[in-house]
Each structure stands twice: as C-alpha cells, then as structure tokens.
Amino acid sequence: MSNRGYARPLCAAFALITVCACGGRVALPQEQVSDAETPDDAAYAPDADSPRDATTPPSDAVVRDAARSLDATDGGVDVAMDAGVDVAMDVADVADVGIDAAPPADAADASVARVVFYLEGYLGAFGGVSGADQLCAAAASSAALPGNYKAWISDALSSPANRFSRGGPYILRDGTIIAQDWTELTSGHLRHPINLDATGRLNAGDQYRYVWTNTAIDGTSFGGSDCLDWSSSTGTGTLGDAFSVTAEWTVSPNPAFPACNYGHSLYCFQQ
C-alpha cells in the first residue's frame, strides 16, 4: 500500500507550524496542493489479482496499519499546535517588552522646542502676574503661535521657578536657540538675546529694550520693586535688558527709565 494516502494530515501539521511561527498565511505551490489533496487512486484501487471486489471489507492487517498511521498523524497535529502556541506566546512577550520600554509622555514633552519673544509697550500696571500672562497669550494668538504662554515676571509669591513648565530648547520666532534647556536658561548666560517679538520683528531699542521682570537669574523672585505687584503706575519696577546675554537679561543693575509710568516690555515663554 502507498503511504501517499496519509500525506494530507501530515502536511497540514507542518503547515500549521509554519503559519504559527511566521504569523501569517503560507501559500503552498499549486502542484503541492494538488498532490496533497488528491488521493492516490492506485492506493485505493483493488488489486487486479485479488478475488475480493470493492465491497469486500479490508483485512485486519490493513485496519491496524491505518490506525497506526492515524495515531502518528494525531501526534503531529498536537506537536504543531503546541509549537504554534509557544511561538504566539513568545511574540506576545516581545510586544509586551516593547510597550514597557516606551518612554513616558512627559519625557517626550521635555524635548519640545518652546518659543520665547518680547512684547513691548506696557506701563507697570497691567493687572499683576496673571495680567502679564494674559498679554503674552493674546500676543501669541494674534501671531498664530500655538500653545500656552506665560510672562517671565515675579511678585512676592509667584515666579517662573514655581509657575513654568520646564523643557527646551528655548527658541526665538525664527528658530534661533537662546538656551538648550532650563539649566542653561538660568545659568547666567544666553546663547542669543531675546530680541524678537511674536511676529519675528527685531527690538528697535530705546526704552523697549528694557523688560519688566523682578526675576532673579534662577527664575525665583528677585525681591526688588515691582510696581506694587504690577498694579500701579507709581513707584519703580525691576527691569532686565533684552539686548544682553549675561545675567543682566533678567536683572539689569542700572536700567534707564525704571519708573512704573514708562512703557517697557515683557518676556513671554511658551509652556
């Protein structure tokens, strides 16, 4: 008797192993499909020399051979199924490792560039720190800059150190980097002056080169004068110099026109 009559279940077992291991479907060549799925007529044809006809029951030996073949085939299917499950679990483990290794969202956000600009023309009475934040937000919106913006300014309680989200790099509207990160921003030395407004226009100088801040180089409150918490046009306020790249960018020792009734600028930082 030919063994080809039992080729189909064995091929199915090996095909299952291949499919599970590769994670997809495998197309067998056409001639292999034809051979595997077409019974060998010669294997089932009655022997010409045999006295029995097509209705004659098979002998006991034939039945035992068929049973052993089916047992072997069943074992092959079990092996294929076990192998497929093991491969699928290994793939799931790899996927799980990939998810666990993904960086947290806040780590990605820390590397997002943040736009910085100056905003000119305000007396020292602009409604406190929150009023300065609103002016920055309005200027950014008018210039079609995305995101949230806050002013680099302090009073006795609030300061950039306790109000800002930190990241970097910090850039001007034209993409020029002024500081790579918060550490460099508060180091006492900038890479470039903050001398462009929200539209990219250069600061013309005069009184607008000076910026209301009352903020120390580390981002905390300087503790100096602040036009009565930035609510009065009398008195004086602490200023920075928008033309400077030293610590004077945030606290200038001898600014011109420190009176609160003069129009100066604000620094605005994207959060």
Image: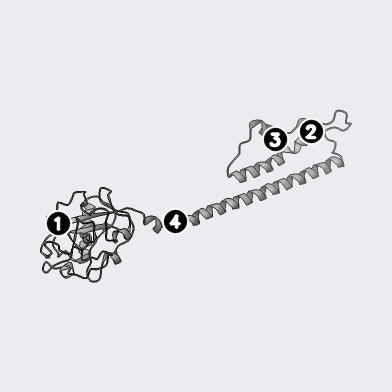
Q: Residues within 10 Å of mark 4 (few under 14, many from 20)?
A: few
Which label number is shown at residue 208?
A: 1
Q: Are marks 4 and 1 in contact (CB under 8 Å)?
A: no
Nearer to me, 13 or 103: 103
Judging depth in this view, the residue of 183 and 172 nearest the camera is 183
Picture coordinates of residue 114 (x, y %)?
30, 54
Label 1: how many Cα within 10 Å (few below 14, some 14–19, many 20+): many
Q: What amino acid type should be assigned to the residue bearing mark 3?
A: Ala
What is the distance, in whole Å, between disc 4 and disc 1 at their CAs?
43 Å
Q: CA distance from mark 2 to mark 1?
A: 101 Å
Name the residue at the top extreme.
48
Q: Quadrant of residue 127?
A: bottom left
Badge 1 marks a residue whose secondary structure is helix
Which tag is nearer the camera, tag 2 or tag 4?
4
- Residue at left offset 12%, top offset 55%: 206
The residue pinned by badge 3 equals 36
- The residue indicated by pointer 4 is 103
Of marks 4 and 1, which one's residue comes earlier in the chain?
4
Which numbered marker is on residue 43?
2
- The answer to whether mark 3 and mark 4 are in CB contact below 8 A is no
